[in-house]
Amino acid sequence: MMNSAAGPGPAIRTTGLTVVRGGRPVLHGLDLEIPRGSVTGLLGPSGCGKTTLLRSIVGVQRTAGGEVEVLGRPAGHADLRHRVGYVTQAPSVYADLSVTENLAYFAAVLGAPKSDPARVIHQVGLTGHEHDPAGRLSGGQRARVSLAAALLGTPELLVLDEPTVGLDPVLRQDLWQLFRSLAEDGATLLVSSHVMDEATRCDRLLLMRDGGLLAHDTPAALLDATGAADIDTAFLRLVEGAPADTADALEGGR
Amino acid sequence: MSTQRTLATARRVLAQLRHDPRTVAMLLVVPCVLLTLLRYMYDGQPQAFDRIGAALLGIFPLLVMFLVTSVAMLRERTTGTLERLLTMPLGKLDLLLGYALAFGLVALVQAALASALTIGLLGLDVAGPTWLLFAVAVGDGLLGMALGLFVSAFAATEFQAVQFLPAVLLPQFLLCGLFVPREQMADVLRWASDVMPLSYAVDAMSRLTVHSGVGGEVVRDLAVIAGCALLALGLGAATLRRRTP
């Protein structure tokens, strides 16, 4: 693969990132750094600003302040359009085109090799569905067509917004193995999820709540720091900002 | 801008049309049926048919392309494919020209069918050269496309997009000279009709039925149509934002 984990500096760096939507602040002054060649999970409840953060990193979100640097360039820079793959939460593919037609078009736009559509179809496990119209696939299959489109051209950074929603456990496992192998080849992945049990599959975690960053660490360090047995509990303890015994009481009360 | 990406986009739009044969059939057949209907409405009044039939040859491509493009572009926006494309190395012009190529081709086929039918079978008299009639029809189709593209930015749903047809095109249709000759209208209405691009589409077609050869006025009409199409395309490009709130 053509990824280069060796590039200088982090894959993503934001300083004081602020986003206001419809008069309400959605992100207030986010500072974070994500190293290259890693899988980072972005976790938090629905509506906490995960998608807005991902959109800011891809450079499609109008920001109100702060800076976002991606692979050494300002987010949204023309050079990055070949180097960053983005999967939106809702699958963004042409429902009336077949899987292959969708991917062939996106590959042509990216200037990716002609063999790329076949490669990514195999990677996301859609072999046998090449000629099905995307609109007639199941929700999970369509989501994988959308993911496949982001894998075209072997981008250095993949920004994935809830790519495993609605998939059965076996497929989810397969996709996480794919994410892992992409990272081993040097790609950087930022994967959002509201399913906390996916956290353990990540090298690093970003926990978000109400447009702010609760924590940014490895899963093990988070569990250590909060004394929790799983990330769900760790999240609760961080929210409460409470000592271990109160959070245990809270957990017992659920 | 890149030729390869523009052509890929045009191919993709045509592939989408190929998967929707009913739309293609309606695009091509409906104008022919309506023109036939018109011919028999004016049975025994060939001059009236010449005048109105020619005007409609200019109006149909504009109408149809307006509708198809505004809905197609709205779909790109609402399904997220536009956002995906704008995160990729696709120039806005690549996208717009890709659409223009694909729908321009459809406009050409539609114009060819409609004019072959009206001139050949229904007996519409056209004094000017046929290629110029085609050029005007394609110009009208492209103008409709550019206008549709522009208004799609202001529609949030397909219902709204369809409503732009009566809102944007019907006033032009009423004032284009089809019902009342433009020079007989009250000053204010005539000024309004002077700044509406559809007036020039109909003027061009009407002149072609009367005058032989390539008249300077037809060329001027065609230039106005092309200018309006470019203006609308430019405004449409301005509504394609890589960053959105």
Image (cartoon, rainbow, N blue to C red):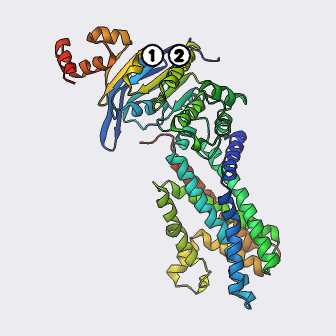
Separation (CA) of disc 2 from disc 1: 8 Å
Would residue A186 be found to the left or right of residue A113 on screen? left
Q: Could you tell me residue A172's position as x and y percent?
A: 49, 24
Q: Residues within 10 Å of mark 2 (few under 14, many from 20)?
A: many
The residue where tag 1 is placed is A201
Q: Could you tell me residue A229's position as x and y percent?
A: 30, 12
Report which quarter residue A2 is drawn in. top right
Q: Is residue B57 above or below residue A232?
A: below
Question: First in sequence: mark 2 or mark 1?
Answer: 2
The amino acid type of the residue labelled 2 equals: Arg
User: Are labels 2 and 1 on one chain?
Assistant: yes
The residue where tag 2 is placed is A180
Residue nearest the observer in this picture, B17 or B49? B17
Q: Is residue A124 above or below residue B162?
A: above
Circle 2 sits in a helix, a strand or a loop, which is it? Answer: helix
Q: Can I make out residue B121 in this image?
A: yes
Q: Is residue A168 above or below residue B147?
A: above
Q: Could you tell me residue B111's position as x and y percent?
A: 74, 66
The amino acid type of the residue labelled 1 equals: Arg
Residue nearest the observer in this picture, A250 or A64? A250
Circle 1 sits in a helix, a strand or a loop, which is it? Answer: helix
Would residue B63 be found to the left or right of residue A21 on screen? right
Chain letter for mark 1, please.
A
Chain letter for mark 2, please.
A
> Residue at coordinates 34% horizontally, 27% vertically from top-left?
A44
> Residue at coordinates 77% horizontally, 71% vertically from top-left?
B115
